[in-house]
Image: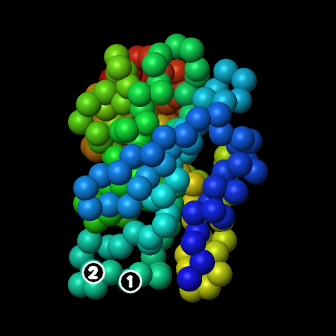
Amino acid sequence: MADVLPLVESRLRSALGEPDARAAVTFLGTDRIEVLRFQEGDIVRYASLGMSAQPMTDPTAVVADPVKGPRAELVLSVRSGRADTDKVLRPLAALAASPQVEGVVVAPGASLDVGEPLWPGAPFTSVLVAEPGGLVEDLELDAPLDPVRFLPLLPMTPNEAAWKRVHGAQALQERWLTNGTDLRDPSRPSVPLD
C-alpha cells in the first residue's frame, strides 16, 4: 500500500505554495502529525499532515478497517500579524490526532473543541468543520482507498459553539454570512446571536 502522505503534501503545495515553516507533534499512542504553515499575502494557512495516513473509523465498528474509510486533513486560515497564531500548531495537531486518539470521524458540520484558547488570547476554543473543496481539492487515491478531503476549520467562540449545538452548523454559518463576519480575523468578537 503506497504511503499517502507524500501525495497529500504534494496536493497542499500545489494548492497553497511552498510552506514557510513546519512542526511535528507526537501524542502518546499516535502517529506523528505535522503542521505546515503557508503564507499568502496577509493570510496565513496552517494545514495538518498525517491525519490522512490512516482512514477514520466509526467508533461503533467492532474491527477497524485498515484500508476503507474517510481520510482528511485540516486547514485553518487566519489573518497574519494580528495575534500570535503560530501557537495554534499544537492544538491543530491535537485535533488532527483526534480520530486516532478518540476514535471520532471528523466530517463537515462537526464541532471540535480543544478546551483552551487556540492561541494566546484567542477568543476561540473550538472550530466548526466546513465543507471541503474550495481551497484545496480532494485528493483521489487508488481504489479501494477513499479520497483525502481537506477540511477548512472556522474558529468559534464559546457562545457560537453553544448556539451551534442548539441551532445547527448551517444556521451558524448563515448568521456569520448575514453579519459579514470576517472568519479569518484571529481576534474577532462573537457574532450577534439574539
Residue type indicated by callout 2: Ala
Mark 2 residue element? loop
Residue in the foreground of this view, choosing between 18 and 92: 18
In this picture the colour scheme is rainbow
Q: Which residue is mark 1?
A: 65
Task: State whether residue 182 appears in this view.
Answer: no
Q: Is residue 166 above or below residue 50?
A: above
74 displayed left or right of 143: left
27 displayed left or right of 129: left
- From the top left corner, tell me how far across and down residue 159 is, in percent: 29, 28
Residue in the foreground of this view, choosing between 52 and 129: 52
- From the top left corner, tell me how far across and down residue 11 is, in percent: 69, 56
Quarter of the figure with the N terminus = bottom right
Q: Which residue is mark 2?
A: 61
How would you rate the neighbour count of disc 2 (Cα within 10 Å): few for under 14, some for 14-19, many for 20 or more? Answer: few
Q: In the drawing, what numbered circle is on residue 105?
A: none
- From the top left corner, tell me how far across and down residue 30 is, in percent: 32, 60
Please tell me which residue is depicted at 34% across the width and 16% down the height of the picture: 121
Please tell me which residue is depicted at 44% across the width and 72% down the height of the picture: 55
* Marks 2/1: CA–CA distance: 9 Å
Residue type indicated by callout 1: Asp
* Marker count (numbered): 2
Q: Quadrant of residue 8?
A: bottom right
Q: Disc 2 or disc 1, which is closer to the eye? A: 1
